[in-house]
Amino acid sequence: MTVGPDTMRAWAVSGRPGGPTRVLPVEREVPRPGPDEVLVRVSACGVCRTDLHLADHDLPPRAPQVVPGHEVVGTVVAAGSAAGRFGLGDRVGIAWLRRTCGRCGPCRTGRENLCRSSLYTGWDADGGFAELALVPEAFAYALPGHLGDEEAAPLLCSGIIGWRALKRAQLPPGGRLGIYGFGASAHITAQLALAQGAEVHVLTREESARELALELGAASAGPAHGSPPVPLDAAILFAPVGDLVPVALAALEQGGTLAVAGIHLTDVPRLDYQQHLFRERTLTSVTANTRADGEELLHLAAALGIRPRVTSYSFDRVDQALEDLARGAVTGAAVVRRGDGVSRP
């Protein structure tokens, strides 16, 4: 595709879910920043399972032919008239949460993730599977210097959502954490939990993911529908599989909490009150994140030396990255690179 000085390359949702035509290469006009926005030249963008849900219409796109991608790393190349937080050339991250109203009850009480007027990168507005991307500067992140662009990208959703899920799971200090599904978010969350003294047990379908879990320090790794070797103080369900909800609840110790971390989940089977919920077991969900979650996660990633395991794809293989994610062929996190960013120190 040939592009001119006022156009850029991008990948847009095609309207044909499933298979290699989920997204198609398109030419778009170079976006112009609004007064409170910055324009970012993308160097890397993580491939989140939410992008796959969007391309497969499990999440109906909110804009026609929207450009997915919400784990964006790049440099600021232009800024609106009222934007002054970042300078030209600064490295920034763009995440899922794009804008909130700032006025509703949740926004005023530190729960902006529940704002009913919230907007999202790559769902409501074009995201990072493009050469350039816009973001309101108040929702952009300064990034830790210990990671290169490709390693930093997965932190911006997989890491942030995993951190919020870990908080929602109410894991006691030194407790036993069960992780169901072991993709991009789970393998970062496991590192966070292990670094803080938790005992981690992983249950997931892919043998390669179980091997990674053990390599990272998990105490055990078994099949997704199996039983952990010990009762769990808390658990997080990352796999978008509703059948695993009663499985994970049954594995909890009394008083334990199961946090469901995905934006999409298949139907949950009928629960048995005595087996699954009695003795003060808790079932809770995770909805997006606040900017405070993002800042906390990035600080912890730097302090604890968290390093995502990355499988890289060139910009012309976004469609293949999504297909590999759908097939369970990605261990760790998938990241699309553009080749002009910051390498790991």
Image: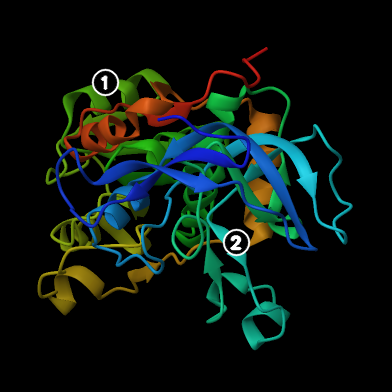
- Camera-nearest residue between 310 and 228: 310
Task: Please name the amino acid that badge 2 sits on.
Answer: Arg
Is there any visible trace of residue 112 in the rendered image?
yes
- Local SS, label 1: helix
- Camera-nearest residue between 226 and 31: 31
Q: In the rendered image, which residue does mark 1 sit on?
A: 211
Task: Please name the amino acid that badge 1 sits on.
Answer: Glu
Residue 333: x and y in percent read 39, 31
Residue 328: x and y in percent read 20, 34
28 up-or-down from 288: above or below: above
Is there any visible trace of residue 157 in the rendered image?
no
- Local SS, label 2: strand
Q: Quadrant of the C terminus?
A: top right
Residue 322: x and y in percent read 28, 38
Question: What residue is shown at x 17% (from left), y 25% (from top)?
Answer: 207
Q: Would you identify the image quadrant in which residue 24 lies? A: top left
Question: What residue is shown at x 47% (from left), y 48% (from top)?
Answer: 162
User: Crowding near pointer 1: few (<14 within 10 Å), some, many (20+)?
Assistant: some
Q: In the rendered image, which residue does mark 2 sit on?
A: 98
Q: Badges 1 and 2: C-beta atoms under 8 Å apart?
A: no
Q: Quadrant of the N terminus?
A: top left
- Camera-nearest residue between 323 and 306: 323
- Camera-nearest residue between 331 and 304: 331
User: Crowding near pointer 2: few (<14 within 10 Å), some, many (20+)?
Assistant: many
Q: Is residue 101 toward the left or the right of residue 44 in the image? A: right
How far is disc 1 from disc 2 in space, using C-alphas?
A: 35 Å
